[in-house]
Amino acid sequence: MTDPVILAHGGAGAPNEDSDGPQHAADVAFRTLIDGQIDSALRAVVEAAVILENDERFNAGTGANCRLDGSIEMDAIVATSDGRIGSIAGIQRVRNPIRVARLVMDSPHVLLCGDGATQFAHHRGVPDDIPMTDRAAKRLATALERLKSGDVRPTEQKWRGRDMHGTIGAVARAHDGTFAVSCSTGGTSMMLPGRVGDSPIFGAGTMCGEHGAICATGDGEEIIRRLCSMRVYLRMAEGMHPQEACEIEVAAFPKPYTLGLIAVSHDAHGMAATDDKMARGMRD
Ligand code: ASP
């Protein structure tokens, strides 16, 4: 038996003052984590993600960013240390993408994308709803203004700038030593329809296995290139403390891109972010 713990984040670059959001999510989900029922780590990380998806300060579910055409496409994943994975990319018209990812976990597939993911969700009874907010509309207006003014151009790498993203996620360890991870995002604030970030890609934005669970946030394209979560996991598998494993990855992340990480192992946990900017919470 090990001590249960849950960590949650509200995205790299999300102001640390917003940490009450992930802290609340961790506190509520902790009750589930210790309920002694089956799959408590999995149920806890889904619960934490739903709470954060419903908090419009964060870029996931309600509060998700728009694409440049005004649509909202979201990515989410949930995974467990016994090898179950449910993932969706580019889903539209749902308020809680993480619930759809959880349904995919029980399907014959690992990852559904685009219209197929949306149809699957509605077919499985998830309400048809567009999670649009004034905040997302304002962010889109700013992004379009920046494009129009020539401040950024579509062909430039710096399209993916520092102030443009956000994501939510949670990692947990249950009494029985099992782990789970959840992650959900509206992507960046300047992106083409069809763009998929790191979040729903196992090994890139998330990782979960017998040695622990990791959730990343930040510039998705760079996180995919570096498979950040997998790298942290491999260090933990060699016995490194999760705090050190996260700090090494953040320090090695190319500038000016940003990275945030939360991680839990059998007997420790860690959190690190570029410039230490990431709304976060923890409960044990
Ligand atoms: N990683 C997310 C993405 O690129 C955004 C973020 O975490 O800030 O879609």
Image (cartoon, rainbow, N blue to C red):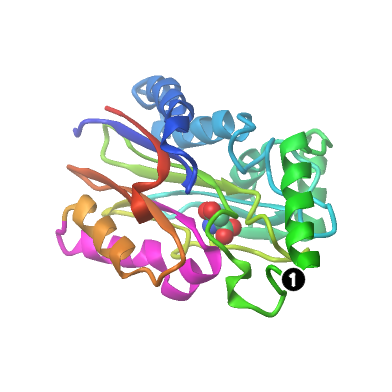
The C terminus sits in image quarter: top left
Taking the image as shown, residue 260 lies to the left or right of residue 121, namely left
Taking the image as shown, residue 275 lies to the left or right of residue 197, namely left
Give the class, few, some or many, for how many residues have Cα within 10 Å of label 1's Cα (few <14, many ≥20): few
Q: For the point 82% across and 57% down, which residue is it?
A: 115
Residue 133 appears in the picture as rendered: no
Taking the image as shown, residue 284 lies to the left or right of residue 45, namely left
Q: Which of 8 and 69 lies nearest the eye of the viewer?
A: 69
Q: Which of 139 and 173 lies nearest the eye of the viewer?
A: 139
Q: For the point 58% across and 32% down, which residue is it?
A: 50
87 falls in the magenta region? no
Magenta part of the chain: 214-240
Taking the image as shown, residue 222 lies to the left or right of residue 229, namely right
Give SS at disc 1.
loop
Q: What secondary structure do most residues of the magenta stretch adopt?
A: helix
Residue 42 sits in which quadrant? top left
Q: For the point 76% across and 43% down, which residue is it?
A: 138
Measured as percent of width and height from the top left, residue 97 is found at: 66, 43
> What is the residue that sits farthest to the bottom in this orientation?
155
Is 248 situated above or below 41? Answer: below
Can you identify the residue that label 1 sits on? 150
